[in-house]
Image: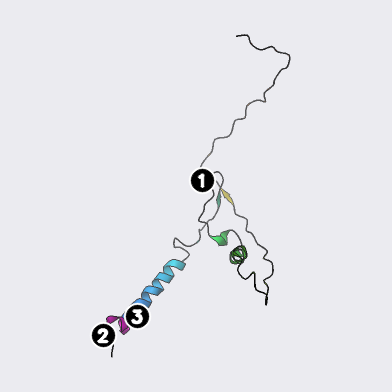
């Protein structure tokens, strides 16, 4: 029996393939919300960001993550060599001006003084 649905037409197939391709381009673009920052850096003061691109922190983030999750750790035929992380130097950025800290003079306690009478 021949299919009478629109799903099996050539135009619908091309439309679905175009939607898949556009979705792939949107998710893998460097300028999308899933991409990497143009000028990455860590805060000078405060909380570190949680959504930093892993390639900004090291040269081999996939190997490090695989080693941490234990992927291929029980392979007895071809054992995986130990992973050596290759970290990148991430610069510190200041996003606001902070007031300088004022330290008080060192406290001097004299032992030859009597307490104040009440």
Front tag of 2 and 3 = 2
Q: Residue at x 27, y 81 (%)?
A: 6
Residue receiving disc 1: 95
- Coloration of the structure image: rainbow
In the rendered image, residue 112, in percent from the top left (x then y), is placed at 73, 14
- The residue most toward the top is 117
Front tag of 1 and 3 = 3
- The residue most toward the right is 112
Residue receiving disc 2: 4
Residue receiving disc 3: 14
Task: Magenta stretch: give its range.
Answer: 1-11
Q: Is residue 118 above or below residue 54?
A: above
Marks 3 and 1: in contact by CB < 8 Å?
no
SS for tag 1? loop
Q: Residue at x 60, y 68 (%)?
A: 71
**Sequence-wise first label, 2 or 1:** 2
**10 Å neighbourhood of mark 1: few (<14), some, or many (≥20)?**
few
SS for tag 2? loop
Q: Observer-nearest residue: 67 or 45?
A: 67
Marks 3 and 2: in contact by CB < 8 Å?
no
The quadrant the N terminus occupies is: bottom left
**Left or right: where does residue 2 sit relative to residue 78?**
left
- Asked if residue 66 lies in the magenta stretch, the reply is no
């Amino acid at each position: 029996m021949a299919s009478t649905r629109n799903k099996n037409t050539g135009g619908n197939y091309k439309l679905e393939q175009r939607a898949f391709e556009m979705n792939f381009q949107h998710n893998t673009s460097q300028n999308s919300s899933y991409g990497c920052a143009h000028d990455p850096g860590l805060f000078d003061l405060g909380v570190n960001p949680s959504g930093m691109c892993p390639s900004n922190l090291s040269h081999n983030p996939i190997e490090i993550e695989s080693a941490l999750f234990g992927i291929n750790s029980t392979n007895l035929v071809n054992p995986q060599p130990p992973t050596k992380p290759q970290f990148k130097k991430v610069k510190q950025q200041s996003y606001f001006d902070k007031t300088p800290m004022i330290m008080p003079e060192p406290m001097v306690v004299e032992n030859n003084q009597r307490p104040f009478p009440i």
